[in-house]
Image: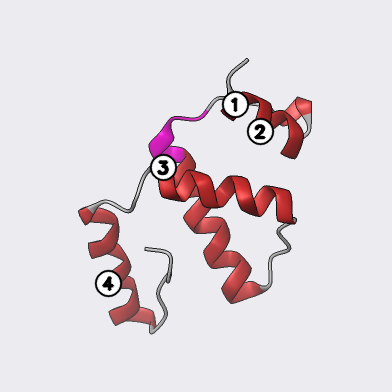
Amino acid sequence: MTDSRLSLLMVFPVWMLIELRDRARAEIARAIFYMHQEYGLSVKPARGQLLKQWNEDDPPSWDEKRRNKKIKELQGTKNPVC
């Protein structure tokens, strides 16, 4: 079992276990961090560490940064993780 799979088993219930592509993991992590900051979404420390690693493994792409900038222009808020 790889480290990432073991990390998933420790953080997420087994019935939720799915294998995500690296890019999808990072985008999900950034979305969850945004919801945590803007809406107070609860993120357990172990899950937060895993999401932080996912974000670091695949930094925001140029397209994602451009989208984030456009969202800030339209609604006044941005995802600080992007």
Between the residue at mark 3 and the residue at mark 4, the CA separation in whole angstroms equals 22 Å
Judged from the image, the secondary structure of the residue bearing numbered disc 4 is helix
Residue tagged 1: 3
Which residues lie in the magenta part? 20-24
Residue tagged 4: 69
Badge 3 density bin: few <14, some 14–19, many ≥20, Cα 10 Å: few
User: Is residue 23 visible to the viewer in this orientation of the structure?
Assistant: yes
Q: Residue at x 72, y 56 (%)?
A: 45
Judged from the image, the secondary structure of the residue bearing numbered disc 3 is helix
40 in magenta:
no
Is residue 69 toward the left or the right of residue 50 in the image? left
Residue tagged 2: 7
Q: Name the residue nearer the viewer: 25 or 75.
A: 25
- Among numbered discs 3 and 1, the one appearing first in the sequence: 1
Q: Position of residue 68 (x, y in %)?
A: 32, 67
Q: Residue at x 55, y 25 (%)?
A: 19
Q: Position of residue 27 (x, y in %)?
A: 44, 48
For badge 1, the amino acid type reads Asp
Q: Which mark is residue 57?
A: 3
